[in-house]
Image (spheres, coloured by chain):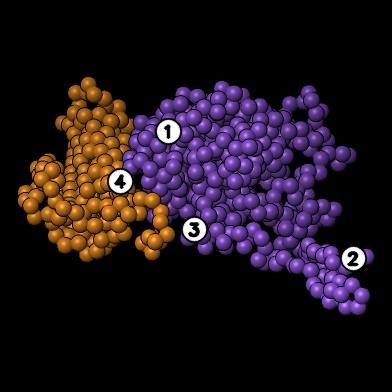
Amino acid sequence: MQTFDLASEGLRKLNQTLHAQNANTNQTEWNIVNPKGSHAIAVGLDAPISVTVNGSTGYYCAGMNQQADVHIKGSAGPGVAENMISGSVIVDGDASQYAGATGHGGLLVIKGNASSRCGISMKGIDIVVGGNVGHMSAFMAQSGNLVVCGDAGDALGDSLYEARLFVRGKVKSLGADCIEKEMRPEHLKILADLLERAGIDSKPEEFRRYGSARQLYNFHVDNAAAY
Amino acid sequence: MVRPGSFTISTSTTQRLIEVTEMKDEKTQFVSRTVPQQSWTFSNPINAEIRRAADTGIYDIRGGGAKRRVPHFDDLLFLGASISRYPLEGYREKCDTRVTLGTRFAKHPIELDIPITIAGMSFGALSGPTKEALGRGASAAGTSTTTGDGGMTPEERVHSNKLVYQVLPSRYGMNPVDLRRADAIEVVIGQGAKPGGGGMLLGQKISDRVAEMRNLPKGIDQRSACRHPDWTGPDDLEIKILELREITNWEKPIYVKIGGTRPYFDTTLAVKAGADVVVLDGMQGGTAATQDVFIEHVGLPILACIRPAVQALQDMGMHREVQLIVSGGIRTGADVAKAIALGADAVSIGTAAMVALGDNDPKWEKEYQKLGTTSGAYDDWHEGQDPAGITTQNPELEKRMNPVEGGRRLKNYLKVLTLEAQTIARACGKSHLHNLEPEDLCALTMEAAAMARVPLAGTEWYPGKAGF
């Protein structure tokens, strides 16, 4: 286990050190102390390493992550795991806006609540939120899965494409072109796998599935009021 | 003398109508009539658009930039040297054209032979061979090209010595591998053709490859977001730029591209957020597709943008430390020289590069007519039927764009732009294009004088100048 004191060593050295790790590194376990809400912690990682952040983070922690497993033992600021490609990011606390924005792959687990626009423009990432998500979550979500174990705020899935949304609690309102869909066995299987990987003990049968009605995929004047 | 039975049609609203008469009864009776008069407000083109809107129920979508006449570089002249100024020998004395972009923070600034770059244009909007041609031409001329909404294609990376990677609101194709393969990063806030709007790529052009790169179903109308998904204001932008720098180890210059709207404040905020380079695009700058009403009615001409942006840089002590690239209607070496004289470090071309490659070439006139248009006016780029094979994803049409020949043509054009700009600079006594200055210019119109803040020709005055 390598320990890195962010307060004394600085952000640039941290990221450079983590970027220097490759597939053959022996230094596979990293412990970051004194994050103190700093921005851009552990961004752009591209190696099969485990990084634990002992405390809360600022903007864009684990942004554009590839391969690495990042565990935030605290809450995360805006844009945690934005544009993640692969690997995993676990947030023990809550996450601010845009969690998992535009992510292409990997798994983001938020054990607490996520704020607005969780999963905005997601492009293949899987996101599991233990609590609630705020308004406009999964806005223009393209692909991947968003699992919400609590409630969802206004305009869930507005203008979404092919992403799957699973919500166990209440949905305050659905966004344009987002509808509730039948939960078929293959969806229950996907959901069960996501919950298991996230370490969240919930029953897939308690969730509802939402997705795109695909009515806005091609512009038609009769749908103008939806925009 | 107007003969009875004929009409003379007035073409000017200020011209008094000519009354003509029609012989109703050959012997005795004349009836006075007015000539048919077209409305200036409800002109034939306007009425045609009203009818089109009524037929279809949808706004007009097209590519390109503003077609309306706006004050432009044509309204400025260089004064040249004579007794009070000393010219350089036109063919022998050196006039440098090199420019370095990204000197503020980046470990590896971009060094270009000429201050003319190729603007961001997406694969999807343009064909793969066209992107390759842009890379080939730019590289041969010693300059950079830029990706677009849709990510980086292998062909443009391979053929571009210097490639700028755009970070757009849609984040289509965005990934850290390409980010690190780029020579610079451009965070796109807006563009001159549609400041405040997102991109648009309609279903006809969402081929399998385009759909895969953008993680979208094939054939849908793709409408990009107008705001970035993970930041909302200038303070956030500063942190976003920090993240991009950290991911790329502070190696790459980071540009911030803005559409011409409030250039003083937007330039100030971009610099405050940490930009190495500000890219400023006027309303004549093209787009692949958006609403015509957006193109023609939102944003400023580039002529009105440059001086406020330069003023912002000067007020912060950042002029030349943060470089300014301007675009939107650059066509000639004179335009290049004028933009630089007003304070830009470089210019960027998009539409002109496409024309150099063959866009709107009269040799395709018959095909343009089949599409209901004519060469020079073709702008339905979103439909993907471009006879020149440039703005299309149709495999057969794409073949018309030979990337090697296209690259040669673009290189030639860039060379001519450079030679022309050098010609002017030498005539003004400048050994580097960057030595051109507003003092070398005068304006032909009051509007241009006010926008460019250079004197009206033959005077020492421009509107707004203190002391007058």
Q: CA distance from mark 4 to mark 2?
A: 70 Å
Q: Which mark is residue B56?
A: 3
Establish whether labels 2 and 1 are both on one chain: yes
The amino acid beneath tag 4 is Gln
Residue beneath disc 1:
B152
**Callouts 4 and 3 in the same chain:** no
Inspect the image, locate mark 2, and give the three-letter code of the amino acid beneath it. Arg
SS at badge 2? loop
Tell us which disc is closer to us: 3 or 2. Answer: 2
Of residue B93 and residue B162, the one placed in the foreground of this image is B162
Question: Which chain is the one coloured purple?
Answer: B
Which x, y percent locates residue A136?
29, 58
Task: Assess disc 2: are there few (<14), some (14-19) or many (≥20) residues with their C-alpha within 10 Å of its C-alpha.
Answer: few
Q: Which chain wears orange? A: A
Between marks 2 and 1 in the image, the one whose residue lies nearer the viewer: 2
**Residue, disc 4:** A142
- Residue under the point 82% across and 70% down: B17
Q: Chain of mark 3?
A: B
The quadrant of the image that shows the C terminus of chain B is bottom right
Compute the Cα span from label 4 to label 1. 19 Å
Q: Are marks 3 and 2 on the same chain?
A: yes
Q: For residue B138, what is the image quadrant?
A: top right
**Residue at point 27% right, 44% down?**
A143
Q: Are the residues at dot 4 and dot 2 in contact (C-beta closer than 8 Å)?
A: no
Could you say where residue A92 lies in the image, as x and y percent from the top left?
Answer: 16, 48
Q: Which amino acid type is marked by label 3?
A: Thr
Do labels 4 and 3 touch, CB within 8 Å?
no
Relative image position of residue B406 (x, y in whole percent): 59, 27
Q: Are marks 4 and 1 on the same chain?
A: no
Question: Viewer-nearest of labels 4 and 2?
Answer: 2
